[in-house]
Amino acid sequence: MPSAPGKAEKSARARRPRGSINPADIIAGAFDFFRDTPVEQWSIPQLAAHLDVGVTSIYWYFRTKRELVAAMTEAALSSFYERMPPLRGDDWEGLLRNFFLDYHRLLAADDLACDLIVRQIGASGDETTARSWPRAQELFTALADAGLPDPIVQHAFFTLSVYTQGFLLVERKGRHAPPLNAAGSDDPSSELEFGITNILRGLRPLLETPAPAQAQSA
C-alpha cells in the first residue's frame, strides 16, 4: 500500500546525524533564524527544527536558552569590538562625541546585535563592565590624558551610554512610523549628535575650577 504523500515527504527530510553540528553552527543558525525575533520569544525547539537537528543536539552545548544568548552576545561583542573605529577627536568633547556616534552607527545597522550588546553593556553601570570593553578602556585613558578627572570620565561615559542606548531603542520603534514633523531632519545621527552636544555642554561646568573663597570682611 503506498504511503501518504505527507508521510513520504517527512521521511525524505532526514535530520542531520548526531554530532554533525557544532557550537559555531548553532550560533550562526540562531543569528539567521532569530534575526527579526525578540529575544523573549526565542525557542530552542524552533531553532532545532530550523537546523534540522534534535533539541538534544543543541542542549548538548547550550543547556539553557540563557547560555545560548550569552554565547551569541559574546560573538556579537567580538564582532562589534573589531568594527569599532579608532578613537578620533581634537579634545575630550570630540573624543566622546565621535565615540558614541560610531557606537550608534554600528548598532543601528543590526537590530539583533543591538539587542544583545545593549543588554550586556547596559546590564550593569559599574566601572568593571565598561573597562572590560577594549575601546572604552582606550577612551577612558585618552580622556584622562586630556585632563578629565576619573569621576567625570565615568559620569560622562555612563550618561552618554544610557542616552545612546535609549536613542537606539526609540529609533527602532519609530523606524516605520510617519515623521512627527515633515520639516525635521531625515538623518537620525544629526538628532543624536544634537543630544550628545547638549550633554557635553552640561559637563563643561563640572570641569571649571572653583574660584577661591573670599574671606569675609569683619
Image (cartoon, rainbow, N blue to C red):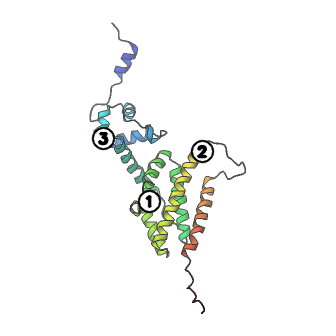
Give the labeled residue for mark 2. Answer: 175
Quadrant housing residue 26? top left
The image position of residue 113, as x and y in percent, is 46, 48
Marked residue nearer the N-terminal end (2 or 1): 1
From this view, report whether residue 109 is shown above or below residue 203: above
Q: As drawn, is 163 to the left or to the right of 47?
A: right
Give the labeled residue for mark 1. Answer: 125
Give the labeled residue for mark 3. Answer: 63
The image position of residue 69, as x and y in percent, is 38, 45
Marked residue nearer the N-terminal end (2 or 3): 3
Query: Few, some or many C-alpha atoms within 10 Å of disc 2 (few <14, some 14-19, many ≥20)?
Result: few
Q: CA distance from mark 2 to mark 3?
A: 35 Å
Q: CA distance from mark 2 to mark 1?
A: 28 Å
Marked residue nearer the N-terminal end (3 or 1): 3
Q: CA distance from mark 3 to mark 1?
A: 28 Å
Q: Which amino acid, by three-letter code, is at mark 2?
A: Arg
Q: Are marks 3 and 1 in contact (CB under 8 Å)?
A: no
Q: Which amino acid, by three-letter code, is at mark 1?
A: Gly
Query: Few, some or many C-alpha atoms within 10 Å of disc 1 (few <14, some 14-19, many ≥20)?
Result: some
